[in-house]
Amino acid sequence: MKKTFLKFEHWTTEFSTLVACLMLAIASALGMFQIVTRFVLEQPAEWSEILIRLSLIWMVFMGIPMAFRQGAMVSVDVLYRWSPPKIRRVLDWVVCIAALALIAVIIWWGLDYSLRGRVQSMAGLESISMFWGYVAMPVGGVFAAIGIIGNLIDPKRNELETAQ
């Protein structure tokens, strides 16, 4: 069961990281497009700014699962370094529960905002509903929760290895 969940978690975290990287690439390309249209062609494309903002929102919420999985998001380095091994495991559970509580709030309110915002349209892109901006919160939150549980089962502490 543990191995199956970790395999599933690995797949979901890799997928969310890929989406985050794709969103960063889209934001960068649209930023360059916006510079060219605004300053070279002197015909600004207002829609590109909204899509940049939207892609950055998705990038952040889809990148959070990798940070949680690597143990780099919610970090209590000093306590962890000074604690004996048995206390470290208790600390892992406390951090996991606190992180899951935060993610549960993000999922709950993100879903609420998404459902309420589906009747709104984005300024500059009236054909796109605000639902697509807000739904990044619950979607990213679900992926993050999987990463948090994965980190509890199989801890990785890459930030502790590089910190001096």
Image: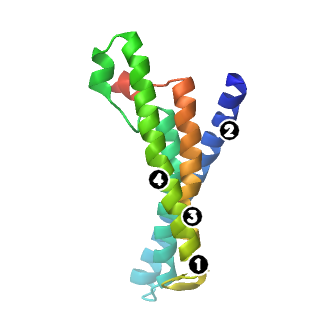
* Residue at horizontal 60 percent and vertical 47 percent from the top: 16
| Badge nearest the viewer, 4 or 3 | 4
* Residue at horizontal 59 percent and vertical 39 percent from the top: 146
Labels 1 & 3 near each other (Cβ < 8 A): no
- Can residue 13 be seen from the camera position used here? yes
| Badge nearest the viewer, 3 or 2 | 3
The residue where tag 1 is placed is 129
Side of 115 where 94 appears, left or right:
left
Height in image: 75 above or below 40? above
The residue where tag 2 is placed is 11
First reached walking from the N terminus: tag 1 or tag 3: 1
Secondary structure type for disc 1:
strand
The residue where tag 3 is placed is 135
- How far across and down, in percent of the image, does residue 122 sit? 51, 81
Question: Residues under labels 2 and 1: Cα distance?
Answer: 29 Å
Height in image: 162 above or below 56? above
